[in-house]
Amino acid sequence: MPTLPSCPKCGSEHTYEDGALLICPECAHEWSADATAVPSDEDDAPRVVKDSVGNVLADGDTVTVIKDLKIKGSSSVVKIGTKVRGIRLIDGTGGHDIDCKIDGIGPMQLKSEFVRKA
């Protein structure tokens, strides 16, 4: 009987196989049997944010809004073609990854899928 690896989350030796998965009964962690024992840290890789057509965005870029965007909680609208200067890339909530200040509207967050690099 082959020995199963310990749980990578809690270190328990009481793991068992269920099909292609290994399961820890103590912490309920599930992982692939062919996964590496050391979990990879994906936070070390630089985050790449792309606009609607695939151009890579960076802090300080100027972008153009490609769709009328209704502002939640307001009757204002960000019109198509609005230029936004000096964006900052963030890890926002709800998929918002651009922090900016739009003339006439103020500070807000945008999703990169609704802008195009100018």
Image: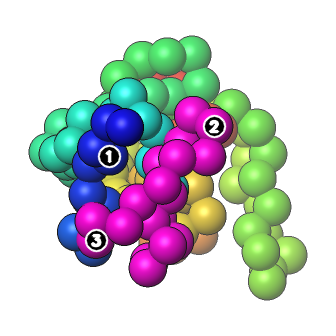
Asked whether 113 falls inside the magenta stretch, the response is no
* Residue at 27% in and 65% down: 13
Residues 59 and 96: in front is 96
The residue indicated by pointer 2 is 19
How packed mark 2 is, by other alpha carbons closer than 10 Å (few <14, some 14-19, many 20 or more), is few
Tell me which residue sits at (42%, 36%) in the image.
Answer: 33
- Determine which residue is flagged by label 3: 12
User: Given the image, on which type of amino acid does mark 3 rest?
Assistant: Ser
Whole-percent x, y for residue 20 in the image: 57, 34
Identify the image quadrant of the N terminus.
Answer: top left
Q: Is residue 49 above or below residue 27?
A: above
Neighbours of disc 3 within 10 Å: few (<14), some (14-19), many (20+)? some
Residue type (three-letter) at the residue carrying disc 2: Gly
Q: Which is the main secondary structure of the residues drawn in magenta?
A: loop
Q: Residue furthest bottom?
A: 73
Image point (42%, 17%), residue name: 55
Apparent side of residue 57 relative to residue 98 in the rendered image (left or right): left
Query: Is 72 left or right of 39, judged from the image as shown?
Result: right
Q: Do the residues labelled 2 and 3 touch (CB within 8 Å)?
A: no
Q: How crowded is mark 1: few (under 14 residues within 10 Å), some or many (20 or more)?
A: few
Q: Give the range drawn in magenta.
A: 12-29
CA distance separating discs 2 and 1: 13 Å
The residue lying furthest to the front in this view is: 1
* Disc number for residue 4: 1
* Residue 101 place in picture, x, y as percent: 43, 63
Q: 89 left or right of 105?
A: left
Specify whether residue 85 is in view. Answer: yes
